[in-house]
Image: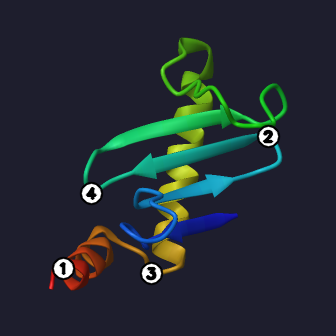
């Protein structure tokens, strides 16, 4: 499942991000105030408390999910330009 969270800052104060979620993993890209990635092993860590993005044991998963994420952004016509559009609207 692909998702994109644009509503920052807002009531929930969740930073802008987009990601892909499966039953096994969740890959998230945070952008705007900060630019970083998180990966969660949803079977070993169902509460998503510890990112394994930097763990070398997950490097193949990171690579695979980044490819899937890029493909889904194209499929759903999401892009960095659209990200910027929403940021510009917020700044007005």
Q: Dot 3 corresponds to which residue? A: 77
How far separated are the C-alphas under marks 3 and 4? 19 Å
Q: Dot 4 corresponds to which residue? A: 32
Q: Residues within 10 Å of mark 4 (few under 14, many from 20)?
A: few
Mark whose residue sits in front, 3 or 4: 4
Secondary element at image label 4: loop
How far separated are the C-alphas under marks 1 and 2? 35 Å
Q: Dot 1 corresponds to which residue? A: 88
Q: Dot 2 corresponds to which residue? A: 24
Tag 4 or tag 3, which sits nearer the N-term? 4
Q: Residue at x 52, y 28 (%)?
A: 53
Could you tell me residue 81's position as x and y percent? Answer: 25, 75
Tag 2 or tag 1, which sits nearer the N-term? 2
Q: Residue at x 58, y 54 (%)?
A: 68
Tag 2 or tag 3, which sits nearer the N-term? 2
Secondary element at image label 1: helix
Q: Quadrant of the N terminus?
A: bottom right
Q: Residues within 10 Å of mark 1 (few under 14, many from 20)?
A: few
How far separated are the C-alphas under marks 3 and 2? 25 Å
Mark whose residue sits in front, 1 or 3: 1
């Amino acid at each position: 499942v692909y998702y994109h969270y644009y509503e920052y800052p807002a009531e929930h104060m969740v930073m802008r991000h987009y990601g892909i979620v499966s039953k096994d993993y969740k890959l998230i890209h945070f952008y705007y105030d900060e630019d970083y990635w998180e990966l969660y092993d949803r079977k070993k860590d169902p509460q998503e408390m510890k990112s394994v993005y930097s763990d070398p044991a997950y490097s193949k998963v990171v690579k695979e999910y980044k490819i899937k994420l890029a493909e889904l952004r194209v499929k759903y016509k999401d892009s960095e330009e659209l990200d910027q559009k929403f940021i510009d609207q917020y700044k007005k």
